[in-house]
Image (spheres, rainbow, N blue to C red):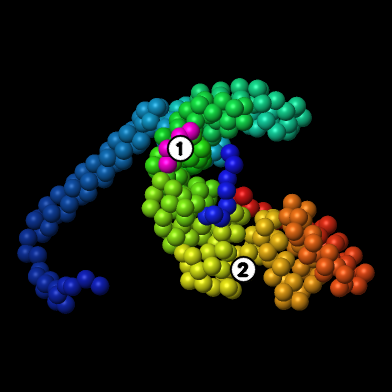
Amino acid sequence: MNERTWPHRSETFHFSTLPFPIKNPARKHENSTSNAIRIRQFRSSSSARRSDQYRDFASLPNDVLTKIAANFSLPNLQTASLVCKSWRDGLRPLREAMLFLRWGKRFKHGRGGVKPSLEKALDSFLKGAARGSTLAMVDAGLVYWEMGKKEEGVALYRRAAELGDPAGQCNLGISYLQAEPPNVKEAVKWLYQASVAGYVRGQYQLALCLHRGIGTDQNLSEAARWYLRAAGGGYVRAMYNVSLCYSLGKGFMQNHRQSRKWMKLAADHGHRKAQFEHGLTLFSEGQMMKAVVYLELAGRGGETAAGHVKNVILQQLSQPSRERALTLADNWRALPSSR
């Protein structure tokens, strides 16, 4: 699915009662005995309650348990399976789904010594989805989408979304935006749910809707807030848009220091437009070698205008400086991101 960027202490008395002597030792013994009985009864009832709670905990219906754990990863499923035998048995289908999910990814990307095959990948993902895994549902939906079978893909996204999977919610929202005609209200509803769950791609897409007034009233301050949350989660396009918000004073107070910070972060994470614009900033500040590095990277990413500016700067540098700058570009690696 194509995505667009910028148009992203308690009160008590201080006295105690006086210790009156006990005149009747037998009564004292009687009180001690009754107290001991009450303590045993309390302990017995507490133990019974704990036992009842454990039985209730272990007798959770398998269909409910499967829905709760539908979007669990393998490590979470393995941990949950250690709770009790009932849970171990009830979560067996989801653990099996993780095996199919792993094979599906191998077939899709040609990993683990297997040849790439979308058909085999889809078959594995569907088997995982049939066992209740929302992770497999989303991956199967993606394959259907790549095959051009969008209705089948959307149906799987919807199943995953209704089970609380943030990726499924996000993909469903984007699907509604791209439908003919678009269903923008439903799109914003599902994107908001994915965003609240902390899914950065959903946060970015929700910010775009708020920025443009799609399916909701235009709200630049809310858009900027969601861009910032997505950027903080490592979403590169959101980093770039946060920089623009600060630069233009849209949604945030204008702040060129913050704008430069986020533009450099986006550039260091591989955003080609950010690399171009950061390179221009460095050029204007007289940092020629650094400017060449970022402009070279932008040009390699497809920003043709970056090459023209880079050539102008190279003419002002000595041959060793030129070679050093280009070597830095060759050895550059993007910082990891959630894209």
Q: Residue 336 lies in magenta, yes or no?
A: no
Image quadrant in which you'd find residue 55 = top left
Q: In the rendered view, would you say 327 is above or below 115? A: below
Please name the residue that numbered disc 1 is placed on.
182
Q: Which residue occupies 40% across, 39% down?
A: 186
Residue 149: image tag:
none
- Identify the main secondary structure in magenta: loop
Residue stretch in magenta: 180-184
Q: Locate residue 115, reporting x and y percent.
A: 75, 27
Residue at the extreme right: 319
Q: Earlier in the sequence, mark 2 or mark 1?
A: 1
Q: Locate residue 71, reporting x and y percent.
A: 49, 37
Q: Amino acid at mark 2?
A: Lys
Q: Is residue 319 left or right of residue 264?
A: right
Q: Which quadrant would the N terminus be assigned to in this image?
A: top right
Q: Secondary structure at mark 1?
A: loop
- Between 120 and 183, the residue placed more toward the observer is 183
Q: How dense is the environment of label 2, judged by Cα within 10 Å: few (below 14), some, or many (20 and up)?
A: some
Q: Which residue occupies 22% across, 49% down?
A: 39
Please name the residue that numbered disc 2 is placed on.
261
